[in-house]
Image (cartoon, grey):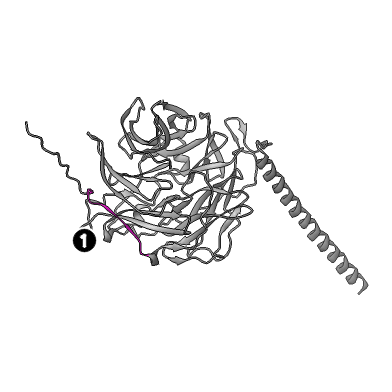
């Protein structure tokens, strides 16, 4: 029997990475030197946000995506946090709303004006306090407006209803720091990876752990749901300390396949595009991005190609589908953080096509900018897939959704019978210092108010005496 190679037809086998010209990059940005394993970057069709190095608190810059070139050192920042900013995420349904979390144990919601910032932004739309330790991860719900998830170093995940500005659920099933959160397409399931080496699939509204895996040969670091394929992909480390990826069924019984990538030590970040079924693997500290095509049949994971660059990446932001250049057959776009150069470099993944017409086969209907559910509907138990849009006609359509912050006093939030804000004790020396400085700042503010009121009282007394004499 003669040997014959097997060829597999794929319209994405020739996808290539194209780095933007230098005049279309962002330069002079002091990217944070924090070693936390996050991207420190978030992007949407309007703005690019990058966490920056700063003293005396945490800050990040927000730049319009069309404002290329060198950024002024005194460019306005979002700087209301008292500790380092650890994660930032744009609202998927409102391009001007961004959430941030910090070492100061808070989550904040900010509204960025059209055209960007003209001065430092210190007042957030919402301040959310509920974690007793620093908050390392935040994720917006993929189909519901006003629902935000936050994971802290207190090993808890809080679900926030931003319409009332309160936590509505606490997921308390982890025994160590949560490393990653990922939703399925309709947001009815949440997958988490944890420092306790376990992979979990959770029903978020009840907090019930549906499936749990603790596989000895594969230490999980990051997890991503593969759209509606009812499968997950994890990146991690093998027993021989090589970087490895594993494909799982949703029941997490055993990995379908495991594949070793290389012997480097940097964390592997997975990015999945459900429209093209392409998986991108980018290593922290590498300059390379590998990409694969995922199928339901063997070999399940088909290696396509590798984008190579000499500049190492600290993190990567991903442009949503409605922000891509469909005329250039662009199917994915990264914003790569190069810390040493203070450079943000757009990298486009392009399908080479000769025709300049709209390519419907590589741009199917995709999740758009309209929520499928309200917060109350989702909390009541309703599940609904994302509202789809065509990139041919709808990608420049303005979003009419308006974010309204609730007017409320700061008060303790009771979730699962636990008061989250009342007398939360500091657990470390840093937390104690932050609490002390916050109290000192509050005392100074109150003293200033008293002084102003004393001056006003004296002025009124003088006015009264003058009026009596006349």
Residue 218 sits in which quadrant?
top left
Q: Residue furthest bottom?
A: 470
Which is nearer the eye, 249 or 208? Answer: 249
Find residue 423 and report its horizontal and vertical position in percent.
69, 36
Closer-to-camera residue (6/441)? 6
The residue under the point 64% across, 53% down is 56
Q: Nearer the viewer, residue 366 or 101?
A: 101
- 16 is within the stretch colored magenta: yes
Secondary element at image label 1: loop
Q: Quadrant of the C terminus?
A: bottom right
Q: Position of residue 458 (x, y in %)?
A: 86, 63
Residue located 32% across and 46% down the image: 290
**Along the horizontal axis of the image, is 52 left or right of 390?**
right
Magenta segment range?
12-21
Q: Count neighbours of disc 1 (C-alpha within 10 A) and say few if under 14, some if 14 to 19, many if 20 or more.
A: few
> Is 341 one of the magenta-colored residues?
no
Q: From this viewpoint, which residue is outermost toward the right? A: 469
User: Residue 283 placed where, x, y %?
Assistant: 40, 45
Q: Circle 1 is placed at which residue position?
A: 357
- State the residue in front, 395 or 304: 304
Q: Residue furthest left?
A: 1
Residue 96 visible in image: no
Label the magenta part by its dominant secondary structure: loop
Whole-percent x, y for residue 171 in the image: 51, 32
Residue 260, compared with residue 318, is above or below; it is: above
């Amino acid at each position: 029997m003669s040997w014959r190679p097997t060829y597999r037809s794929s319209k994405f086998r020739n996808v290539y990475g194209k780095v933007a010209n230098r005049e279309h990059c962002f330069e002079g940005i002091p990217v944070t030197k924090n070693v936390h394993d996050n991207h420190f970057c978030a992007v949407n069709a309007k703005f690019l946000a990058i966490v920056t190095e700063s003293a005396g608190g945490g800050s990040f810059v927000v730049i319009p995506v069309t404002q290329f070139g060198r950024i002024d050192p005194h460019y306005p920042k979002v700087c209301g946090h008292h500790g380092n900013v650890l994660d930032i995420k744009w609202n998927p349904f409102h391009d001007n709303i961004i959430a941030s979390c910090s070492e100061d144990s808070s989550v904040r919601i900010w509204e960025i004006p059209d055209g960007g910032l003209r001065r430092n932004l210190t007042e957030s739309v919402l301040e959310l306090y509920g974690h007793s330790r620093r908050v390392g991860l935040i994720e917006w719900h993929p189909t519901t407006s006003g629902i935000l998830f936050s994971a802290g170093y207190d090993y808890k995940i809080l679900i926030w209803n931003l319409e009332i500005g309160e936590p509505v659920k606490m997921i308390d099933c982890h025994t160590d720091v949560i490393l990653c959160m990922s939703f399925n397409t309709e947001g009815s399931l949440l997958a988490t990876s944890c420092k306790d080496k376990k992979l979990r699939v959770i029903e978020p509204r009840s907090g019930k752990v549906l499936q749990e895996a603790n596989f000895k040969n594969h230490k999980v670091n990051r997890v991503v749901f593969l759209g509606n394929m009812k499968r997950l992909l994890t990146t991690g480390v093998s027993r021989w300390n090589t970087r490895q990826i594993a494909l799982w069924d949703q029941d997490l019984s055993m990995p379908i396949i495991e594949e070793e990538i290389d012997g480097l030590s940097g964390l592997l970040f997975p990015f999945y595009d459900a429209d093209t079924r392409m998986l991108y693997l980018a290593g922290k500290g590498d300059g390379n991005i590998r990409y694969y095509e995922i199928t339901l049949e063997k070999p399940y994971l088909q290696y396509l190609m590798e984008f190579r660059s000499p500049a190492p990446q600290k993190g990567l932001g991903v442009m949503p589908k409605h922000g891509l250049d469909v005329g250039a057959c662009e199917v994915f776009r990264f914003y790569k953080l190069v810390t040493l150069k203070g450079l943000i470099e757009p990298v486009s993944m392009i399908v080479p096509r000769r025709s300049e017409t709209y390519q419907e086969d590589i741009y199917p209907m995709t999740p758009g900018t309209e929520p499928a559910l309200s917060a109350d509907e989702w909390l009541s138990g309703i599940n609904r897939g994302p509202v789809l849009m065509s990139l041919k006609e709808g990608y420049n359509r303005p979003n009419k959704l308006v974010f309204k912050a609730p007017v409320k006093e700061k008060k303790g939030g009771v979730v699962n019978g636990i008061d989250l804000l009342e007398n939360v004790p500091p657990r470390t020396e840093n937390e104690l210092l932050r609490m002390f400085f916050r109290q000192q700042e509050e005392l100074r503010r109150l003293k200033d108010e008293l002084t102003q009121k004393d001056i006003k009282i004296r002025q009124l007394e003088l006015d009264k005496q003058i009026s009596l004499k006349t």
